[in-house]
Image: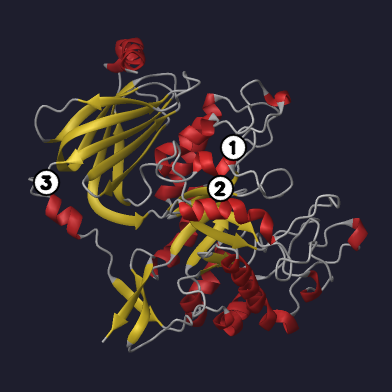
Amino acid sequence: MKKIFFTILALTAAVLHAAKITVTVSSTRCQTITGFGGACCDGAMCPFGSDTQPVRLLYGPQSAIGLNIMRMEISPNFIGDVVVPEWGNWDSPYDWKGSLPSAKIVKQRGGIVFGTPWSPPGEYKTNGTAQGGNSEDQGYKRGKLRTDCYDKFFLWLNTFLAYMKKNGVNVDAVSIQNEPDWWVSYSGCLYEPQDLVNLVKNNAHLLDRETYPGVKLISGESLGFTQNYTDPLMNDATCREQIDIVAGHLYGHAPLDYMKKSAVLAAKYGKEVWMTEHSVTDNVERLPNWHEQLLFAEELNECMLAGCTGYIYWYMRAHWAFVGTGETKYGSGNTKNKLLPRAYVMSHFSKHVTGSTRLDTKSSVSTGTNSAFETSAYIKGDSLIVMAIDTTKNAHELKLVLPVKVKSGIHLLSTGNETENLCQQQTIDIDEPTSELTVALPARSLNTYIFMIDNESAAIKELTTTQQPTPVAYYDLQGRRLDTPRGLCIEKLSDGTSRKKVMP
């Protein structure tokens, strides 16, 4: 491993002196990161069923990748017994039980599982079917939730929670709707922003938080994380009390655009911000190249900079995702149930950034340096983490100015040159505690620098004490906000998390 690392350094040493990038990490705390994950499905949304190898490879602290959030579909069934086909593939029905085997493993490994409906039951809708209505066989009848069924919606979500709990899975969160702003021919349901406000304001109290304590409610997950779907829920006090996680997707909009704007009110009111679906280069008829993998790394990084607390990729298993499908038409590296390069790119974040708090950064590039460079930084216990991504052909020196002194460190490096281990590791030599040091930034690379903080540093007390979240609100077990909390309550904290607490 060391030989590989030193070979890379030797190849880049000739140009290191020509360019320097300086990253200054401040002690200003931003959001706390809940984690990273993927959807429990492949091939036209069918869940994995008894094939649990993808989640076994990807989830848990002992895995090479370290995912901890799993998304599953709440198909438009009743009590998991009525089978409803999906995506026009009428020979391949699905229902709630398809996600159970994988969900059990994720929970056993300490992970989070949540469900998203693509459509409520068809009989609740204006077009009488789970389909969105954007198809000739449905006469282009737009499928919306009937207003006279608003009071049934959360009761239906309760049946999903009951079914999963009965079968050994305590679901952590449920969403209102996948892409409420996208008219589709497959399962779908349209909502105007005011529809969601009316639904949540008048009916979300029916979500049974007493029977399923701690279950969180996720906003409608709009196609492009648009503010017109997120801000109305945050601006309404009643809706704000019910919504725990503001969510959306990235189709058509980069993270530092709409998502960042939508995160403003969410952060103000102590809500988490989850990016719950996107795929990068999913339309290529080949395995993604290394440049495309670095673009995925940049998306992850930009989501963190936008205020994201949870990032959930689309399929876990696809030739453009984390685990191979076995389809040889995409290339010889697409071995079924074998980790793909994109999984190792994800591991930089999922293994190390999960549970951390992001710190504000700024960077500057020396004159004459042509670099497409991105960075972010985090504190996690006694560790200070700096991420750095460079998509150019030139290597650089990276000068780090840190808010505390560090006494040791490791460099995790991915360059795409390896096929078996895309995350190499090397020790960073530090002679004595320092807050300024220079490290290597190889060409076309994803880098994670993890430093051990010197506890004797004068700045460490300020940095670590501000890390502790503070209470912002209290709720009873039915999810109703309490002005004067007493007895067993749900205490919501400033970092978006919540916990049970007995108040005097």
How far across and how far down the image is residue 128, in percent? 84, 71
Residue 101 relative to residue 243: left or right = right
Q: Is residue 485 visible?
A: no
Q: Which residue is mark 1?
A: 321
Gap between marks 1 and 3 measured at Cα: 40 Å
How far across and how far down the image is residue 80, in percent? 71, 66
The relative height of residue 325 versus residue 108 in the rendered view (above or below) is above
* N-term-proximal mark, 2 vs 1: 2
Q: Does dot 3 land on a helix, a strand or a loop?
A: loop
Gap between marks 2 and 1 measured at Cα: 9 Å
Residue 283 relative to residue 186: left or right = left
Question: Hey, which quadrant is residue 9 in on the image?
Answer: top left
Q: Does dot 1 land on a helix, a strand or a loop?
A: loop
Q: Residue type at mark 3?
A: Asn
The relative height of residue 321 versus residue 156 in the rendered view (above or below) is above
The answer to whether the residues at label 1 and label 3 have Cβ atoms under 8 Å apart is no
The relative height of residue 347 versus residue 498 in the rendered view (above or below) is above
Q: Which residue is mark 3?
A: 455
Observer-nearest of 318 and 470: 318
Gap between marks 3 and 2 measured at Cα: 36 Å
Q: Residue type at mark 1?
A: Ala
Q: Which residue is mark 2?
A: 38
How far across and how far down the image is residue 208, in percent? 55, 79
Q: Is residue 94 visible?
A: yes
On the rendered image, what quadrant is the N terminus found in?
A: top left
Q: Residues within 10 Å of mark 1 (few under 14, many from 20)?
A: many
Q: Residue type at mark 2?
A: Gly
Q: Does dot 2 land on a helix, a strand or a loop?
A: strand
* N-term-proximal mark, 1 vs 3: 1
The answer to whether the residues at label 2 and label 1 have Cβ atoms under 8 Å apart is yes
